[in-house]
Image: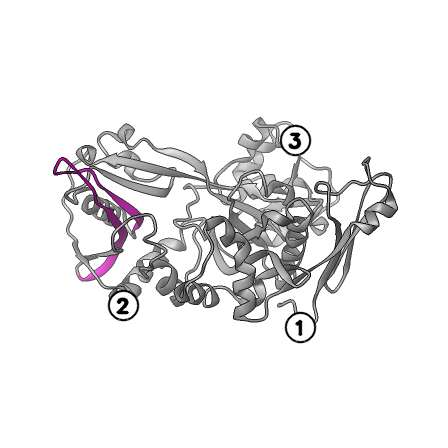
Amino acid sequence: MDFGDTAHISFTLGRTGGEPPFFGESTATVTLILGASFNRNYHGPGKLQAQEWRESMMEVGVSPCASVEDLAAALNPIMHYFGGGFTDHDMARWSRTIEIPRMLAVRDNGDVVAGAGAFTFEMSVPGGTVPSAGVTVVGVLPTHRRRGILRAMMRAQLDDIHRRGEPVAWLWASEETIYRRFGYGLSSLSGDVEIPSAAGEFERRFESTGVTRIVTEEEAFEPFSTVYEAVRRGQPGMFSRTPDWWKLRRLADSDRARAGGGGVLNRVLLTVDGEPRGYALYRLHQSFESGISSGFLNVIEAIGSTLDATRAIWRFLLDVDWVVHIKASLLPIDHPLLFLLARPRLMKMRLADALWVRLVDVPRALAARTIAPAEPVVIEVSDHFCPWNEGRYRVAADGVERTSAAPDLALEVNALGSIYLGGFSFGQLARAGHIEERRPGAASRADALFPRDRAPWCPEVF
């Protein structure tokens, strides 16, 4: 469901102060009008009295984009932090991969000062898939920080996601401190590696039966997407890619993508008995010192639909000549390379936070993933930002339903987001103090209901 032609959000914010704004003994009321009203009252000490505060207010509008021109303006706030500027390819890339009304813009006196968007995805979860919103390009110009604009955009966006019937929202966070307050939980980790070419030997001898060849952008689409889709449905954290996504965001070789100094985008296809089984996207960053190569190969994405295909595509990458290192980012923390390489320590894997997940509709989100046959548990969920989620749920293999029974566990919704894809367990969060066990052993019982056989993985930042 879209916002509609007449939907609008209006609110008033102080020009000074923090988020939320506290002024004297007065009450600041933020009203977001989007088919319904949302009122939040803030109280607190401050220097301004009520009349002074009212005079310092400004009107700010939050509304969905209606045109490509609106979209370009709404992207400018986040692009401010990446050097700004758009090419024709950039605009085609965005206008054909995001639904324009899903991009929100905040205007101050007609000028766009903030924006937030969401892709329409099908996300893979343990045992299934779920409609989801891939939150992206959230940015506020530095001239308008600390005025509650981000909170207002998150309010409007999550309400819209809820109305659209998408049970889950997820994102990559530019700063990991931002999104917990809006109900997002750290759901997966990723690893960056830098493998010395001299340390690329496998522990066990491997002879590939496949054939690799470099293909063009046009040749790559069909076999690459076939391999990706075969892997995606069984890999929590991956999302569906449309043909435009492949052509404009993954296979195209744009000037912006080369800004890091790499060469052309290489697209390598692995076939076994004539059928596509794996692929790799990589760039060579070449340099020389005293006539000897000091460059590296940067792996953008490498996927095999079987273990042998994964071995073969990585064997190809590790055997490329004239580089000192093979670098790769965003790998799952249980990547087969940890066991394929004879000296995995030399990968120097560095971990970072990856996906952040927000359950927008708790019962529907849980019903979309596998719940194993085990003893049911009652979970009490707190969710102040999306209060429709608050309550107690009986979770069992035969379904998830609201209940008035006494809870076995109590947690905030972001803790449930951390568990959702299988990256973390109830036990881990309980030991970290993010889950309260109301009955002894409840975390272990909950873990039995939420099976996981691999780490979540999303191979690209969206």
> Could you classify mark 2 by the number of other residues whose Cα lies within 10 Å: few (under 14), some (14-19), or many (20 or more)?
few
Q: Marks 3 and 1: in contact by CB < 8 Å?
A: no
Residue 407: x and y in percent read 70, 37
Q: CA distance from mark 3 to mark 2?
A: 53 Å
Q: Position of residue 198 (x, y in %)?
A: 17, 33
Q: Disc 1 vs disc 3: which is toward the camera?
A: 1
Q: Which residue is farthest left?
A: 291
User: Residue 436 — which label?
Assistant: 3
Amino acid type, residue under disc 2 in the picture = Glu
Q: CA distance from mark 2 to mark 1?
A: 38 Å
Helix, strand or loop at label 1? It is loop
Is 133 contained in the magenta span?
no
Question: What amino acid is found at the position of numbered circle 1 in the picture?
Answer: Asp
Circle 3 residues within 10 Å: few <14, some 14–19, many ≥20: some
The tag earlier along the polypeptide, 2 or 1, is 1
Is 431 on the left or on the right of 380, as rendered?
A: left
Q: Nearer the viewer, mark 3 or mark 2?
A: 2
Whether residue 133 is visible to the viewer of this picture, yes or no, is no
Q: Residue at x 45, y 65 (%)?
A: 91
**What's the mark number on residue 218?**
2
Residue 60 % position (x, y): 71, 58
Q: Residue at x 55, y 62 (%)?
A: 73
User: Few, some or many C-alpha atoms within 10 Å of disc 1 (few <14, some 14-19, many ≥20)?
Assistant: few
Q: In this view of the protein, can residue 395 be seen by the observer?
A: yes
What coloring was used for the rendering?
one colour
Magenta-tinted stretch: 274-302
Q: Toward which corner of the image does residue 242 lie, by quadrant?
A: bottom left
Secondary element under disc 3, as helix, strand or loop, is strand
Tag on residue 5?
A: 1
